[in-house]
Amino acid sequence: MGRELPSGITNWLEDSPLCSRFSHAQIDTSGIPLNARLIGYMSAHTWNFPSNIISLLPSLQHIPLAGSGIDSFTWRPSSTGKYSLKHTIEALALPAPPAPWYQLVWNSLSIPRHRVILWLAVLNKLPTLDSQSMAYKHILNHCTLCLFSGESLNHIFFSCSFTAPIWSHLQNTCGFYTRSQWNDFIFWASHHWSSKSIANAINKLALSASLYHIWVERNSRIFQDISSNQNTVLLKITNSIRERLLPLSLKDGVAARRARQAWDLPSSFIRPPPRPPDEPPLQP
Ligand SMILES: [Zn+2]
């Protein structure tokens, strides 16, 4: 209730002070100083505001009186009244629908560090050499994976001779086909993989794992002068996907069987059907 709060200038009355409800002339007439303490207008069971104030705002009398406890701070954005960074950010953030690609990136099956690379790529924020060479003239723009072309998101993921067999293998395994432009592909995937089917979840997992390991291979060549061949990169991608799928146990169905076959998963990947209830014993 804020018993010790100044009654005239503190937001205790439905988020506004008394001085915003009345003119200064009305407050002067009431005899309430702006800095008077709220407790001065409380008795045991009711409020004791001046009659001219009550006549202008009768609802004041119906505000429930708190108990005799001492004042304490309440953090309004939080339902518990206690400070919480999460609730504060939610209160400050402008309400907006999630981005169309939100589930493509931030889904529960994809590996967290893979999601970050996909997120940067979706935002066109991966520091590819085409953008770097424009900002820094001493940086040469050439793809360290194939050594034949400039490096860009579109090149790495759609026209690079090093990554092409990797993408081709994954597309055949997952059953989807990429587009020739990165932004077109993300737009397409965001809409076509929006349902929460296991096939879509695996597609997202495979996409983020592929981007991650291709990007790691690219960085390894640039910063450590260490390179792996396509089969090794593809094996890392496949192992990442399998490791994520191995602990799962799905209900039997066409999609689950297809995924089990495609990623060479054990029989535990598919849950056995529940046993029927025991039949009653036959009567003699
Ligand atoms: Zn290339």
Image (cartoon, rainbow, N blue to C red):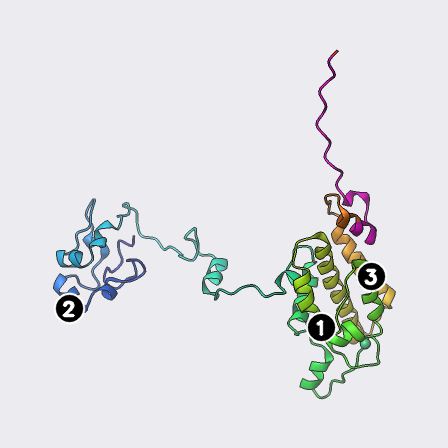
47, above or below 212, in the image: above
Highlighted magenta segment, given as a residue range? 258-283
Is residue 150 in the magenta section?
no
Give the image location of residue 122, x and y in percent.
Answer: 66, 70
Tell me which corner region of the image, top left, top right, bottom left or bottom right, holds residue 241. Answer: bottom right
Could you tell me if residue 258 is visible in this image?
Answer: yes
Secondary element at tag 2:
helix
Tell me which corner region of the image, top left, top right, bottom left or bottom right, holds residue 101. Answer: bottom right
Residue in the image at 22% along x and 58% along y:
37
Q: Quadrant of ligand 1?
A: bottom right
Give the image location of residue 107, x and y in percent.
Answer: 65, 58
Q: Which mark is residue 25?
A: 2
Q: Which mark is residue 144?
A: none
Which of the pair 129/168 is nearer the observer? 168
Around disc 1, counting alpha carbons within 10 Å, would you say few (fewer than 14), some (14 to 19), or many (20 or more)?
A: many
Give the image location of residue 23, x and y in percent.
Answer: 19, 68
Q: Is residue 142 left or right of residue 87?
A: right
